[in-house]
Amino acid sequence: MPSKNILKQDAPQSFYHIYARGTNRQRIFREPSDFEKFLRLFQRYLSLQEARNAVGIPFPNFYNKLELVSFCLMPNHFHLLIYQHQQGAMSDFMRSLLTSYSMYFNKKYKHSGPLFESRYKASLISDDAYLEHISRYIHLNPRDWRKYEYSSLPYYLQQITDAWVRPERITKLFSTPAEYMEFLEDHTQFKEMMDILKHELANAKNI
């Protein structure tokens, strides 16, 4: 279950549910190219091979430090489920991700001031039984979740693969992609988990 132990908020070999929202609920993704930029930043920092900038300087690489297990990008917020191998990797990754995206957004839209309401919220998941439900919560965020372009669901359904998305820690709990879809569509069970997950987000630590 979501952990209330603040002393363990940065633990190795642990799962985290991460949430970030635009300041005053403003849109952080205004058009498709913004979503696509954020996905490219995932690729930059989480690919197996180290990425480099135009003059050959390497970007930080987190492939062996953490795994992106699930994600969903919504117009004014996003959710991630990650598995952190090394203590501190989540903080370093999120700093790189949010700084790079904020610089892109501010330059493109001539925006000033903080883009995000807070740096982000992260909740340590201390009970593996909650993991599949958190992935479902993340994937069901959009109304048109079955066809939504900016979530990790296609990776769970084995429609596409990329090294920077690693859903196996959840998909191994289901015998087939079809079984995972049935799990998503079980809204009765999902509603039973909603209050727990909303409480978890409300009480998550600002990092």
Image (spheres, helix red, strand yellow):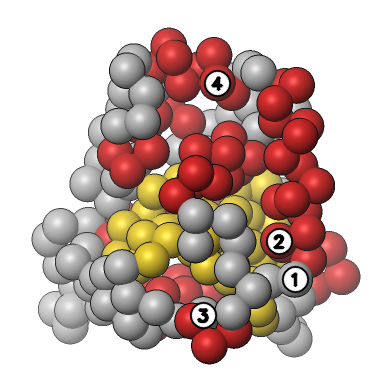
The residue beneath circle 1 is 203
Q: CA distance from mark 1 to mark 3?
A: 12 Å
Residue pictured at 53% horizontal, 88% vertical: 7
Q: Quadrant of the C terminus?
A: bottom right
Q: Is residue 32 above or below residue 100?
A: above
Contact (Cβ within 8 Å) of mark 1 with mark 3:
no
Name the N-terminal-most of marks 4 and 2: 4
The residue carrying pointer 2 sits among few (fewer than 14), some (14 to 19) or many (20 or more) residues within 10 Å by Cα, namely many
Name the N-terminal-most of marks 3 and 2: 3
The residue under label 1 is which amino acid type? Asn
Q: Is residue 127 above or below residue 153?
A: below
Contact (Cβ within 8 Å) of mark 1 with mark 2:
yes
Name the N-terminal-most of marks 3 and 4: 3
Find residue 123 and report its image quarter. Answer: bottom right
Contact (Cβ within 8 Å) of mark 3 with mark 2:
no
State the mark number for residue 74.
none
State the mark number for residue 183.
4
Residue pictured at 59% horizontal, 84% vertical: 6
Name the N-terminal-most of marks 1 and 3: 3
Find residue 134 and report its image quarter. Answer: top right
Contact (Cβ within 8 Å) of mark 3 with mark 4:
no
The residue beneath circle 2 is 200
Does residue 119 show up? no
The residue beneath circle 3 is 9
Q: CA distance from mark 1 to mark 2?
A: 5 Å
The residue under label 4 is which amino acid type? Phe
x, y (%) of residue 76? 74, 56
x, y (%) of residue 60? 26, 78
Q: Quadrant of the N terminus?
A: bottom right
> In the structure shown, which secondary structural element does the residue marked by tag 4 occupy?
helix
The residue under label 3 is which amino acid type? Gln
